Image (cartoon, rainbow, N blue to C red):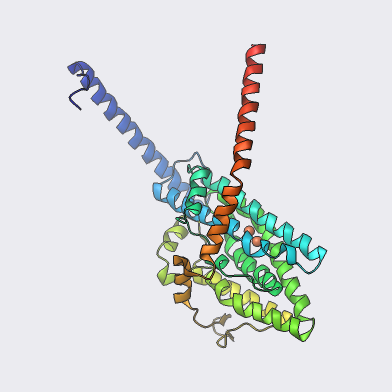
Amino acid sequence: MSAQSPQLHPVEATATTEQISEDARRAAEEARVGWERFEQLIAEDKRVEPRDWMPNNYRKTLVRQVSQHAHSEIIGMQPEGNWITRAPSLKRKAVLMAKVQDEAGHGLYLYSAAETLGTPRDELYEQLYTGKAKYSSIFNYPARTWADIGAIGWLVDGAAITNQVPLCRASYGPYGRAMVRICKEESFHQRQGWEILYTLSHGTQAQKQMAQDAVDRFYGPALQMFGPPDDESPNSKQSMAWNIKRFSNDDLRQRFVDMIVPQAEALGLTLPDPELKWNDERGHYDYGDLDWDEFFSVVKGNGPLNHQRLAHYRAARDEGAWVREAAAAYAAKQQQAAHDAALLTA
Ligand SMILES: [Fe+2]
Ligand SMILES: [Fe+2]
């Protein structure tokens, strides 16, 4: 208490102390009951909802994961958005535009889900704007040719689906439900990418080569989308114990490899890994080591386009400020008009 603070009468002081200890006791009891209920929901594989009590680390883990996911959807619009004006036909342009719009929608579902955990959306936007937040490192690679749009759809959206289908059962309700909608659209994205590559790989020799080069470029980074190997992924275990994550990074990566090998054969393209071969004993494809030094370097901000992606995001956000301000002013005006009308009829 500072020298200027009013002195409490001893009786008042005692009452305040008692009140504080009563509040603390009640808070501790609420936390105990909440903790038990939380543990029970997880044990029974049920959903945790926004109003439920949850441990701080569970909340923090989810805010980080869901917001990183949202940021990835938003930054992920850039490599493909860049090809909308150069798509080879009106049909391709319309399909690509729809896909990029879907990604914007995915970002919005996920920001909404993250917001239910108590972090305001503006704070999440700010974290991306200032470069504090991370997003999937795959989007720091350029889309050099039209075939890259095919490889991104087939491999990048394909890896995203493999990762995201189990997230539909994530224990946090708003996240799991957002993922259900997202996965439906992702399977269309993968299909359109595969179809672009199929058309190119069955075209002229030059087109087939362009498709092969694109697959060569995106194969490694797509496999890295599942994150570092299990023994270098310290948070995975806890996420699995909380039913957020259902399978480990390496298990998901294996599932993805097993899925794309026959698809590559159907495309008539090869995957750039000489160690890729069927292992009868394991019942899976073996694959070679990935370049993790490159992965961590891109994560740290040294990828081919980290700076460009962020600069583009910042410019778009700055240029769109007037739209947000106008929308907020309009909403405030509407609210005031409703308030005035209510006063008049009262
Ligand atoms: Fe998406
Ligand atoms: Fe997608």
Q: Nearer the viewer, residue 103 or 312?
A: 312
Image quarter (top left, top right, bottom left or bottom right) of the N terminus:
top left
Q: Is residue 346 above or below residue 16?
A: above
Q: Which residue occupies 48% across, 78% down?
A: 291
Quarter holding ligand 2: bottom right
Measured from the top left, where is residue 221 in percent x and y? Answer: 55, 73
Q: Determine which quarter of the picture holds residue 98.
A: bottom right
Image quarter (top left, top right, bottom left or bottom right) of the C terminus:
top right
Please state if 202 lies on the left or on the right of 277 as rendered: right
Query: Is residue 272 visible in the rendered structure shown here?
Result: yes
Please state if 85 lies on the left or on the right of 8 as rendered: right
Q: Which residue occupies 63% across, 36% down?
A: 326
Q: Which residue occupies 21% across, 18% down?
A: 8
Q: Which residue occupies 44% across, 55% down?
A: 132
Q: Nearer the viewer, residue 213 or 282?
A: 213
Please state if 202 lies on the left or on the right of 130 as rendered: right
